[in-house]
Image (spheres, grey):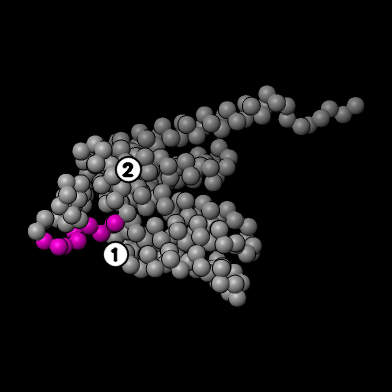
Amino acid sequence: MIPSAAPTAPDLVSDASLTRLVRASLLLLFSYVFLANAWMGDDAYITYRVVWNFVHGYGLTFNPDERVQAYTHPLWMLVMSASHFVTREFFFTGTFVSWAFDVATVIVLMRWARTAPRAAVLVFWLLTSKAFVDYTDSGLENPLSYFLIALFYAQYLNRPWGLTPDTRELRRLFLLGSLAVMYESAFRRSASSSAAAISSGFLAFTTNASRPSAWAPAIPCCCSATAV
């Protein structure tokens, strides 16, 4: 009688435990690199002053008596406003919020990678990028950028190629693309968020254009992004 080559239950449990251990170790390594390179740029305090005025009832302005929009990343400004409303502090609050978005980004990428070896290669590859590491914490919007882009492309690249997207999938992708535009400054808006917009537009184009419902989810998202 030929023995079965199927893995036993203890083997499966062991593999799952090993994967969790590897992922936890990668998160610890990333957190160490994050703390070792954490800093706060002076540009962040431009947004923080607007946040302080907003939380204290003076409006979204740099100077209370001047109607000037000093911030260039609306979504990040709103996230920091909600955080500052709770903590009433900026330095450690900004560091923690940045770390939370960075860790969420790594988790999304590790889940997309599926296996522990691929996750390890992906995380180590990210940590070799000085541009990525230096801005994992600076008080600016980069951590939120990483998270939104990871969410978008983890879903976009995980879908079967050539399969026509349904309305719900288009809605999710266009929502993530619009949020990516909201987080970014006008200076960077032509880079990563444009790539997300092009990818979303391609999916919408491949959908049957004769069905208005296929394009309907894109209309409010594109309008909100353009308004920002």
Q: Which residue is mark 2?
A: 98
The kind of residue on which mark 2 rests is Ser
**Mark 1 or mark 2: whose residue is earlier in sequence:** 2
User: Which quarter of the figure has residue 124?
Assistant: top left
x then y, percent, for residue 70 = 19, 59
Q: Does 69 appear in magenta?
A: yes
Q: Nearer the viewer, residue 34 or 160?
A: 160
Q: Which residue is mark 1?
A: 186
- Tell me the quadrant of the picture where the C terminus can be found: bottom left
User: Which quarter of the figure has residue 15?
Assistant: top right
Q: Is residue 31 toward the left or the right of residue 171 in the image?
A: left
Give the label on residue 38, or none. none
x then y, percent, for residue 168 = 56, 58
Residue 45 appears in view: no
- The span picked out in magenta is 66-74
Seen in the picture, residue 85 relative to 222 is either above or below; the reply is above
Q: Looking at this rendering, what residue extends furthest in the left direction?
A: 65
x then y, percent, for residue 10 = 68, 23
